[in-house]
Amino acid sequence: MPEQEVAARRARELRAEIERHNEAYYRHDAPTIPDAEYDKLFRALQGLETQYPALLTADSPTLRVGAAPLKEFSPHRHGVAMLSLNNAFEPAEVEAFDQRVRDGLESIAAVDYAVEPKFDGLAISLTYENGTFLRGATRGDGATGEDVTPNLRTLRCLPLRLAGEGWPPLIEVRGEVLMFKAAFSELNVRQRERGDKEFANPRNAAAGSLRQLDSRITASRPLSFFAYGIGAGADELGVKTHGDLMDLLAAWGFPVADERRVVQGAKGLLAYFAEIGAKRAQLPYDIDGVVYKVNKLAAQSQLGFVSRAPRFAIAHKFPAEEALTVVIGVDVQVGRTGAITPVARLQPVFVGGVTVTNATLHNEDEVRRKDVRVGDTVIVRRAGDVIPEVVAVVPEKRPTRDLFGEEPLNPPFVMPTRCPECDSAIEKGVDEAIARCTGGLFCPAQRKAALTHFAARRAMDIEGLGDKLVDQLVDAGLVHSPADLYGLTVETLADLDRMGEKSAQNLVAAIETSKQTTLARFIFSLGIRNVGESTARDLARYFGQLENILAADCEALQQVNDVGPVVAASLAAFIGESHNRQIIDRLRAAGVNWPASEPVDAGPKLLAGKTFVLTGTLPVLKRDEAKAMIEAAGGKVSGSVSKKTDFVVAGEEAGSKLEKALELGVTVIDEAEFLKLLNLGV
Ligand code: IVH
């Protein structure tokens, strides 16, 4: 047998054996060989793959240690949209859900529900092609997420190749990535020992670990996964219930929750809620409620979707956590766009898994309505990942004297008329709840925010330049604009408080490294209003060179996919400002550069000349969003169907327009097909 064939066979054997040990260790918590033996097998496989690179397969366990860092994540359009769930908090809402289900199914008998924990992590879609893990992405906006494939490969509990057989050629497995509580505590101990930032809770740790451009970091983080459903490929499985689907996923090698089961009727749902609620603290992972799904898949299709959520499922959430604390100050914060937000400074209080010291009061009207004053005892609420907020004041506890016992009563909050940071006027547009500082980049708060954005990981990626250091640099007058960063020296930095020689050297080195970037990152880093990461990417791809963008007018800009009149206007305004041009020139003169590339002639826009009619409720996209997407791709949206209509995009409860389309023989597509058109063109 030729040498390479022997090697190929050995590699296959090693892969199978290593995955067997992985499964025993990571899924069943029952190691089958000593670590040293495992390492030997692993290194043998790595050796073979290095010697014969052609032997490396997409499902090789050696990929689990991570790969070279990416510059950025690429977008991934889901085959089937990732939806969200409607929430219930009260038993009455659960009963109403059950009633709606029975009405929809015309069922007198109690309905069977598959019930399971609601994992508090982040939603992920995994695509398998012919049983091999091909791609994995975050939920994103439901239609498009971020491709985090190399990171997901490092999760030992995920099968790189499906066990068993009978899987469709293409399947999307949906589930939640999370971190177990014990693993989270250990990770934080490690972070602390190394002087790295600790994570606030397991969910943040999971999200932070998965969204690493360097998958070797992800590989070092103890992430887990639970499967809870299927996207594309669901119709080809031959199972009849959600319960059977979960068993099938388990047989293919996916972790599924032990707590899942099937119950009957609203009574069964509420009993399950109580049972899991009592167990919540003992579960090894965080949950924020339970999920109820109609068990029969045929009944699920019959019930369908409304807006962005299924009618056949609901999340029954545990109440958000609340705590009492005292307001020690009320002041205002200036945001990146100049928005002025009143903030309550609080006596530190532990709520919803973190220590809270500030809570947002949203806007002036809100503070008035709640009448929050210094010295008040307030109820603070924090749910999931949202910013803590002040729910209400406890009026009986309002002090009759102020904290110093002098003034008889603390006065109500008044919005300052001048920005606390730059003394520019604060203005509020007619009909606007939000007040804004008019100082623009002269306002240090806005300048600081612009600099933090510029240095962010997904922008110029200046490691170590976070908001604290930006504050110091601006306050010391060392940095006014992003261009000033490139003039910083170890000597000037070393004068700053708490900045040692070594940290100063590291920062200067990180700033130097950041000079090598991509055009897309550079555009994104400028913080142009309405120009997010994906628009920046589209602009870079379309124009190829910065000079071409700077020379483009509104009309030229709108040739870019996804750029409509609003984005084009923001860009044109930014480009037209000589101050911005100067900063760009200075950045380039300082050596900021990117690989040259030719403009990609996008040719005519993908949907140029095509007329669309939208009807019914789409599962994920709102009507306005779909319309904007069509227009940005060069298509037109019309209100009525005629022979000239090219496509009717039909959602739930599409009525007469759908009938008309069928009558005229106009092509009718659903949301998934529509998204495909946007990607691939007609
Ligand atoms: S089913 C059609 N099951 O909750 C909707 N979701 O608001 C499919 N989640 O983004 C979702 N545990 O990340 C489902 N057992 C579970 C879940 C679960 C957590 C999350 C999921 C989704 C969000 C829905």
Image (cartoon, helix red, strand yellow):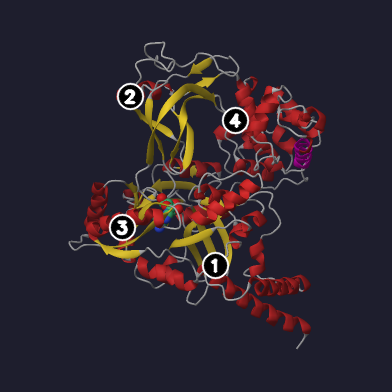
Q: Are marks 3 and 2 in contact (CB under 8 Å)?
A: no
Give the residue type at disc 1. Tyr
Residue 120 colored in magenta in the image: no
Residue 507 colored in magenta in the image: yes
The residue wearing badge 4 is 570
Q: Separation of disc 4 and disc 1 at Cα? A: 50 Å
The residue wearing badge 3 is 275
Q: Is residue 86 above or below residue 497?
A: below
Q: Residues within 10 Å of mark 2 (few under 14, many from 20)?
A: few
Q: Is residue 148 above or below residue 597?
A: below
On the image, the x and y values in percent for residue 595 come to 77, 46
The nearer-to-camera label among 4 and 1 is 1
Q: Do the residues labelled 1 and 2 touch (CB within 8 Å)?
A: no
The residue wearing badge 1 is 26
Q: Separation of disc 1 and disc 2 at Cα? A: 52 Å
Secondary structure at numbered mark 1: helix
Q: Tell me which label, 3 or 1, sits earlier in the chain.
A: 1
The residue wearing badge 2 is 397
Residue 557, numbered label: none
Q: In the picture, residue 115 is in which quadrant? A: bottom left
Secondary structure at numbered mark 2: helix
Q: Tell me which label, 4 or 2, sits earlier in the chain.
A: 2
